[in-house]
Structure formats: structure tokens, C-alpha cells
Amino acid sequence: MSLSSGVPRLVDAVLDRAVVPGYSRLGIALRRGFWADDDPRGGALAGKTAMVTGANSGIGKATAEALARLGATVLLTVRNRERGEKARDEILDTVPDAQVRVEVCDMSNLGTVRAFAADLVNRVPGIDVLVHNAGVLPEARSETSEAHEITLATHVLGPILLTEALLPILGTSGGARIIFVSSGGMYTQSIPVDDLEYRQGDYRGAVAYARTKRMQVALTPILARRWAAQNASVYSMHPGWVATPGVAASLPGFQRLTAPILRTPADGADTIVWLAATARAPESGLFYHDRRPRTEHYLPHRRDDESAVRQLWTFCADAAEISPNRS
Ligand SMILES: NC(=O)c1ccc[n+]([C@@H]2O[C@H](COP(=O)([O-])OP(=O)(O)OC[C@H]3O[C@@H](n4cnc5c(N)ncnc54)[C@H](OP(=O)(O)O)[C@@H]3O)[C@@H](O)[C@H]2O)c1
């Protein structure tokens, strides 16, 4: 039985529209009943290399563990080596034959990302899966040393630059899958074309977070077209509401209120792992949740027009110092 047939389709649609149950552990528990025959097969990633950013915690760590279990060599890409090594050791405790390595890169600093990628392309023959998972929800506005607002730099600029700089080794062994871990929070925002760095008005971390998660989703089709020549598929996705150290620290009220219904990190990683490892690459350029493409807009007034997306893309390409029209 699959999510696209009869009753499962109806249950799936109801969960989607009802939001809270759909994003909760109930949503994935119900949907899981319909996709048992669609799990990536054992050893699906044997011989492949996967990079996961923000891999020392929460969803990133669960993703890294699951990818390693499927046979991938996993590059745990973290901003703090000690935290990365602790995560690596914990993954090895549960998957003793895992091939996991710690790489250090602060995803919010474009100079660091550029230097990291330049070094990596000389050390690693190929990357088959790239998971842009690193995320922050700050209390107050802050800028990187390169004067970019922190959520924009971490969720949008750093990942675009990293992917672009890794192109020489991306998908060299038959295609790559690139996954942006976005958030359903993006439904509440549209692209703030006139204030991409969030300099105007009262700064709210949750708004900055949702805006930049919206940007990831809005850019996914453009990036899918751009990187298609690399035989790369590009996805954005929402993991559901997941109990992680990040949620506990940034949204303690939400965590307290929703604790009984939050997903586990492994649940949150499920669609990332499926996108990375299911036998046939799912359709590129779309936004996924619980193994299905989902609408990018529920609220008509949040819909971005083409010119807003184009302006965002030009801004990002300029900030990352890449040509916006690479062919
Ligand atoms: N949990 C949810 O309910 C939920 C819902 C929707 C979307 N998401 C998304 O899922 C992703 C993972 O979140 P999580 O809930 O698992 O949170 P988490 O436990 O806080 O994990 C976030 C990870 O990102 C890393 N990170 C932050 N800034 C970084 C940087 N500049 N460079 C490199 N790594 C950096 C953190 O490293 P440190 O440990 O060093 O801080 C941490 O490993 C995020 O993109 C988040 O937006 C989560």
C-alpha cells in the first residue's frame, strides 16, 4: 500500500490539513503503516559518501546514524570538533561498523565554508548525499563577521556556497542528492525582498528562522535547475515537530506544551534518509514532508511571486560570490 492510493491518501491529506497531528508523532506513526514497502533497502548507500551539517545533535545526528547504517561513509560536519567527536563515538556505539568522520566547518561563515570546501575537494573523491541540516533559532539579532544576519547565513548563504564549491566532487559516481532541512514554520512567512538581512523592525528569532526556511523552499526549484547538470537532485523538506536539544533550548515553551506529541530525532530524520537513499531519486525541486511532496503555500497572502524569488536568488549569488546564471 502506498501513500498515493485510496484510504492512505485520504488519511494523509487529513493529517496534512490538520497540521498538529500531521507534524506530531501520530502523523508519522499513521503514515509509516502505508510506506513499509518503500524503505531504502539495506546497504543502499554502500560505497557512497554523505555529508551532514550540524551532525552532532538532534535530527542531524539521527540522520548521520541512519545513513551510516545504510552503508554510507558519513562526514559529520560540525562547528565544534569536540561535540562532533562525541557524536561520532555515540554513533559508533550503536552502529559499530559505521564509517563516520568528523569535519569542522562553521556554516555561517562564507570564508570558512569556501576554505573548507577547497580543502575537501582535494581530500575526498566524491560526495553523493549532502544534507544541509545545520540550523539556529536565535534570541536576538546577530551578524556574522561578514555582516550577514545569522539565520540567513546559516540556512541559506552557507549551504548554497558549500554546494557550489563542492560541485567538482558532487555526484561523481552517478548523481547526487542535496537536501535542505527546512521547516513547516516557513508557511507563516514570505520572502522579505526589501529586508533580506532583517535590519528593519523588531527582530524576532522565530520570524527570522521562518523567513530563511521559506527562502530555502523558494530557492529549491532554482537550485534544482542549476545543479541538474551535475546530475544532482535538490530537495527541501520538513521533518515534523521533533524533540531535539535545539527545540529544548530555543523554544522551551513549545517543548513543554508539545512534549507528549513530539517526534523522535529518528522520526525527524526519516524523510531526509528516504530522499537520500530510496532506490529511484524522488522528483527534484520540490518540498517534501513524510515522504511526499507537499504544497509550498497554504496562505495565499504568503505566496511569493517570481520576481521576489529571482531577487532573492540574485542577492544570494552575489553574497556567495557566484555567478547567478551558471550554465
Ligand atoms: N526540531 C524540530 O522540530 C525541527 C522542525 C523543523 C525543522 N527543523 C530543522 O532541523 C534542523 C536540525 O534542528 P534540530 O532540531 O536537530 O536542532 P539542534 O539539535 O539544535 O541541531 C542543530 C545543529 O546545527 C548545528 N549548527 C548550528 N549552527 C551551525 C553552524 N553555523 N555551523 C555548523 N553547524 C551549526 C548545531 O551545532 P552546535 O551543537 O554546535 O550548536 C547542531 O548540531 C535545523 O535546520 C532545524 O531548523 C527542526
Image (spheres, rainbow, N blue to C red):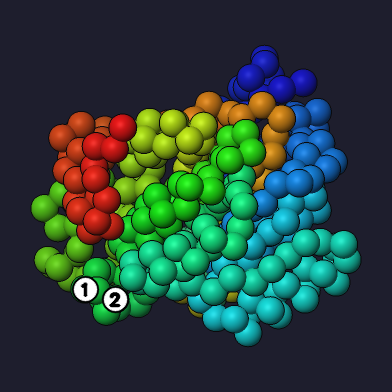
**Nearest the eye: 189 or 13:** 189
**Nearest the eye: 137 or 308:** 308
Measure how far apart labels 1 and 2 are at the Cα level: 5 Å
**Residue appearing at x 58%, y 29% in the figure:** 282
Place of residue 22 in the rendered image (x, y in percent of width and height, measured from the top left):
58, 42
- Badge 1 crowding class, 10 Å Cα cut-off, few under 14, some 14 to 19, many 20 or more, is few
**Residue appearing at x 73%, y 72% in the figure:** 88
Q: Quadrant of residue 306?
A: top left
Q: Please indicate whether residue 93 sits to the left or right of residue 23 in the image.
A: right
Q: Amino acid at mark 2?
A: Thr
Residue 297 in the image: above or below residue 113: above
> In the structure shown, which secondary structural element does the residue marked by tag 2 occupy?
loop
**Residue appearing at x 71%, y 30% in the figure:** 279
**Nearest the eye: 286 or 68:** 68
**Residue appearing at x 74%, y 51% in the figure:** 72
Place of residue 304 in the rendered image (x, y in percent of width and height, measured from the top left):
23, 37
Q: Any mark on residue 147, and which? A: 1
- Number of callouts: 2
Place of residue 240 in the rendered image (x, y in percent of width and height, measured from the top left):
56, 50
Q: Amino acid at mark 1?
A: Ala
Q: Any mark on residue 144, and which? A: 2
Residue 97 in the image: above or below residue 70: below
